[in-house]
Image: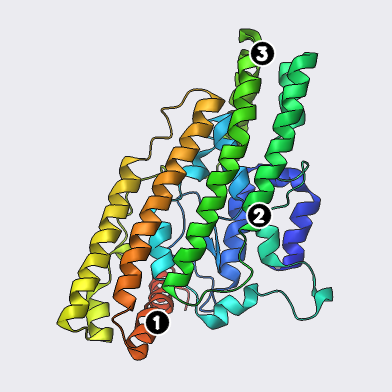
Amino acid sequence: MSSRALARHYRYSAALHSPAMRASVTAGAALAGWHYGRGRGGWWRHGNGGYGWVGPLFWPFAYFDIYDYALWGPRVGAPFWYYGYDDIYAGLFGPYDYRGLSGYLPPRDSSGGPDRLSLLCGEDSREIAGLPIDLIAQAIEPTEVQRAALDDLANASVTSAQKIKAACPSSIALTASGRLASMQQRIEAMIAGVATVQPPLEKLYGLLNDEQKARLNAVAEDQERRTERRRSRSLARPCEVTQSSNLQWPAEEIETRLHPTEAQRGKLTALQDASARAAEMLATSCKPDEAATPTARLAATGKRLDVMLDAVKQVRSALDGFYATLTDEQKAQFEAIGPRRTSVADRADRRRYGRW
């Protein structure tokens, strides 16, 4: 999907408030850089059809996903919970090589259109990435005191979106360590964004009476019905453990390509163990249905992001320890696993659908 195509979606920004539309835009942008061919998908695809990584960018439209879950609940906000271990795995064995990643760089000729990554990172205006303040106001019909609190929330939401957008990558990481560093930076910005919005949301919600809360819940139910109508196929539930063989640890391929020494095998085992712990941490922390109010759900996003950050840090630390023992040739062989596995997955996909 070209930058111009993405720009068209931003001119009709209301469309991006649909989780299905965001998944479609993300898929188009992710597969545009996959020079082996579009096929029918990719092994790093989420259960809703979107992608956690688009080129060097982790978590496109992050702010939308946060507030969809916080305001409208687990069914509308399911995309937030699709992010997890699979994305760490994709960070380790990224599906793009340099040729594929180069398409995400800003065009040399500035007249060629807006930067694709900047668009996927989201605008930071109230009309685009901020909370749907007008919709909230229409639902609760705020008093003067509540209107002031709602304005504070609106300003905080824009500030939060700006923090998240600031973590959009300005360069391309061609190593697994660089990708995990970018992932960590993005999650840290999201945590800061949630912390910015949490106090004004709690203040506003505390000022609402029971009737206003009921009307806000009714809007959430309406959003849920609209989301259900747009779904044309059964979606995998968030946080399901991926059973695809494409996401199994590529121990045999690492052995064949790197021929590690005994000392390197010890570090490799530590990396594999850290990866397994990350998967377990993220599986056990996935509880999208437990929080019942917008404030509780926003707090839940913060807790989930904290776990994701810890998981990424553990894997990144183990990866750096392993990398320190490798020769330049071994590093090159390790980085080549990602594009090769993508190519193999694509060929298998086309065999399945008879598209050669």
Residue type, numbered disc 2: Lys
Residue carrying label 1: 336
- The residue located at (57%, 40%) in the rendering is 194
Front in this rendered view, residue 97 or 41? 97
Considering every residue shown, the one lying at the far left of the view is: 262
Residues at marks 1 and 3, CA–CA distance in whole angstroms = 56 Å
- The residue located at (74%, 63%) in the rendering is 5
Residue carrying label 3: 212
Considering every residue shown, the one lying at the far right of the view is: 111
Secondary structure of the residue carrying numbered label 3: helix
31 relative position to 266: left or right: right
Residue carrying label 2: 165
Secondary structure of the residue carrying numbered label 2: helix
Residues at marks 1 and 2, CA–CA distance in whole angstroms = 30 Å
Secondary structure of the residue carrying numbered label 1: loop
How far from the left and from the top, in percent, is residue 246?
33, 66
